[in-house]
Amino acid sequence: MKKHANLAFFVPHNGCPQQCLFCNQNRISGADSTPTPQQVRAQCEAFLPAAGGGARPTEIAFFGGSFTAIDREIQRGLLEAAAPFVRCGRAAGIRLSTRPDAIDPETLDFLAAYGVTAIELGAQSMLDSVLAANRRGHTAADIARASALARSHPARFELGLQMMVGMYGEQDPLAGALETGRRLIALGPATARIYPTVVVENTPLCDLWRAGKYRPLTVEQAALITARLLALFEEAGVRVIRIGLHADESLRASAAAGPFHPAFGEIAQSILFFEKMQALLIPGEKELTVRVHPSRMSCAVGHGRRNLLAFARQGVTLRVLPDSTLPVGSVKRAEPAAG
Ligand code: SF4
């Protein structure tokens, strides 16, 4: 599958029927107001490559709140601004994120008419008790229903599903995340995003944390769970297109507690690569040389060289070599040269 770049517009907190426990959308998106159609048009003109140009195809993305729950005329204005850039080939499509309970057949027809190609649903969990505890206002059945509608629509929308780890109300964060991951995979998404639950100021979750009623995961705990999920999604052929929140200035300032780390994705990938390399080590071996795709060298070496150091603690010298012929996530033993 071809990788896309995004020209992203944030539509903050617009259209949300209630406030989820963990969300202060203005802070999470780093934006304070909905873009106007004029702004969308101007940014597309300024930043989209000419038709057929650019290193990778670019999609116009509306992220943040619940796009299909906002006033229909606002949706129409934004989509009308974006659609001509898809029609003339300067953008590969339009991607948007929304709530599972804000999807129905008529809405999908509306989106298809404007050239929307990918729909990402904020699923967060497939456990109804966790969804209710976080005041999501929808159930796991809503996620399944919306996913099926998007996939079976004649427009064949690319389905993306977003989930969180370490949510309030999860008795066993690892088991809960894996259960959610498996059930999301069964819905047939093309892509997934994984977010650790970060306590953001001015949210109900922050009040619970201050009252001692919520204990967030550490970075290491959340990364370990995320690594397990990455393995699950990888095995199922689901492309994970984002791990962790964007570490912009406003989130840096408002993250009160929890696994917020600018390199969270790399830490989780490092753990996954460590496990893959560990599985290649023959007992008693003192040296291990592996080959990985050049884009994954830092994950194999590990964030802060953590994998080199972990092998060194076992008395093993790890060497990592780049090999552009390998698939991005794979790790191969480098056999000693003949002769
Ligand atoms: S639906 Fe999404 S954007 Fe709206 S409050 Fe909940 S998490 Fe935030």
Image: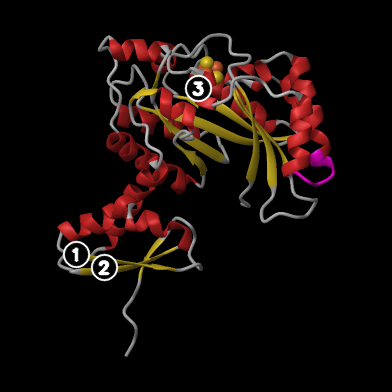
Q: Quick check: marks 1 and 2 in contact, CB under 8 Å? A: yes
Q: In terms of depth relative to the viewer, which is nearer, 129 or 321? A: 321
Q: Is residue 90 magenta?
A: yes
Task: Name the residue beneath numbered marker 1.
Answer: 316
At which x and y percent is residue 322? Answer: 43, 67
At which x and y percent is residue 73? Answer: 78, 16
At which x and y percent is residue 155? Answer: 75, 35
At which x and y percent is residue 289? Answer: 30, 69
Q: In terms of depth relative to the viewer, which is nearer, 5 or 235? A: 5
Inspect the image, locate mark 3, and give the three-letter code of the amino acid beneath it. Arg
Q: Quadrant of residue 313?
A: bottom left
Sequence-first disc among 1 and 2: 2
Q: Quadrant of residue 60?
A: top right
Q: Majority secondary structure of the magenta segment? A: loop
Q: Pointer 2: residues within 10 angstroms few (<14), some, or many (20+)?
A: some
Sequence-first disc among 2 and 3: 3
Task: Name the residue beneath numbered marker 2.
Answer: 288
Inspect the image, locate mark 2, and give the three-letter code of the amino acid beneath it. Leu
Residue 115 can be seen in this image: no
Q: Quick check: marks 2 and 3 in contact, CB under 8 Å? A: no
Residue 312 can be seen in this image: yes
Q: Which mark is residue 27?
A: 3
Q: Pointer 3: residues within 10 angstroms few (<14), some, or many (20+)?
A: many
Does residue 59 lie above or below 319 as drawn? above
> What kind of element bears circle 3?
helix
> What kind of element bears circle 2?
strand
Give the magenta-colored segment's residue range. 85-92
Alpha carbons under labels 2 and 3: distance apart: 44 Å
Left-right relation of 175 to 78: left
Q: Residue at x 69, y 49 (%)?
A: 57
Alpha carbons under labels 1 and 2: distance apart: 7 Å
